[in-house]
Amino acid sequence: MTSIIKRELRSHSKASERYIDVEFCYPNAQNYATSIPLKYRRTGTDIPDDGIDTYLAKVHQDVHPMKRTKWEEEQKSFWKTKPNALVTKPFFDALVKNYEWCCVSCALPKNSNPARRIQDLKEFGYTLATVNRYCSTCKKPTTHYMLVPLARGGIMGYETWTLAMRTRIIKLLGSFDAYEAKKAPKEELLPDHKFPEIRWDKNTKRDSLESLSDDDITRDFQLLSNQRNQQKREVCRNCYQTGERGTIYGITFFYNGGILWDAKLPQNGKDAEHGCKGCGWYDIKAWRNALLERLKT
């Protein structure tokens, strides 16, 4: 019996995501129809065409229905560390009821900003697939989401941090909001990877952040509000898709390079970080200081 039946390859251009719809078959368990991300920046996943079969074979074992009980117990422990996620948690609960497509309009909790709640789940390291399909209840095409029960951070392993590590980063960086250029309440700040995840590859992610030195943290992170973190993500996504680097505060200034991505540099991987340097969003504090120096001349 074929253990993996491949269906359709799909792309979600807005999120720069790519999926393959599959049906996983198991000798002693019910078949599982799902959608597996092949390109998913939140977990650093970017599977080339010649690596799909190998990747699906790994996922086939990881999402085995017999492993769900253990996986769900692990998630209970995780959510205990998120006592303030009272709005996002019900979305997770709805998505894990049957691991099927959930219509945003009728199968998920009512919320004024459901996309934000889905983004929260992705930021927590969960793997979700997205599709626009006909809803038999709503009688029209709607956005549907499906949660795939992979380890948080995915097989490729997106960098996640503990509460203690998050606290350490914010404290070390002085609760300084890089965009606003002033100190802010720590509860309003997020550690932001200067090098955007959309340009990561499988070799970019570190196995652990706990061993980072103070210099490592200062080099790799800045602090932003959630709103600015989302804004930066959209700017970086547009840069990745169009090759036009982003501007900040409406000022077209780059202390290194110009408005266009350097075609000599790779699109992904650690070497791609050289193409980000000079952009205001990459290191807002360095950009601001460079601009002030330019104004002195």
Image (cartoon, rainbow, N blue to C red):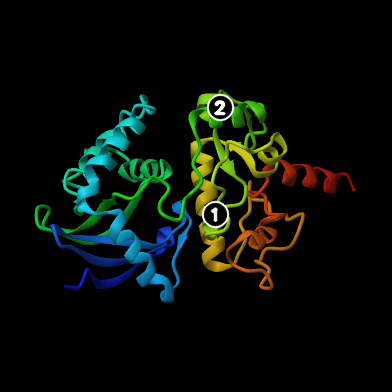
Query: Of all residues shown, which one is farthest toward the front?
Result: 28
Q: Nearer the viewer, residue 201 or 296?
A: 201
Quadrant showing the N terminus: bottom left
Q: Position of residue 154 (x, y in %)?
A: 40, 51
Q: Nearer the viewer, mark 2 or mark 1?
A: 2
Residue type pointed to by label 1 = Val
Q: Is residue 104 visible?
A: no
Residue type pointed to by label 2 = Thr
Query: Of all residues shown, which one is farthest toward the right?
Result: 297
Q: Which residue shows up at 55% across the image and 58% down it?
A: 200
Looking at marks 2 and 1 on the same chain, the residue that comes earlier in the sequence is marked by 2
Q: Which residue shows up at 88% across the image and 44% down it?
A: 296
Mark 2: give few (<14), some (14-19) or many (20+) Cα within 10 Å: some
Q: Position of residue 254 (x, y in %)?
A: 73, 56
Query: Mark 1 = which residue?
Result: 235
Q: Is 45 on the left-hand or right-hand side of 132?
A: right
Tell me the SS state at disc 1: helix
Q: Position of residue 20 (x, y in %)?
A: 31, 67
Q: Position of residue 196 (x, y in %)?
A: 57, 52
Query: Mark 2 = which residue?
Result: 167
Mark 1: give few (<14), some (14-19) or many (20+) Cα within 10 Å: some
In the image, residue 229 sits, relative to residue 6, either above or below, namely above
Q: Nearer the viewer, residue 240 or 271?
A: 271
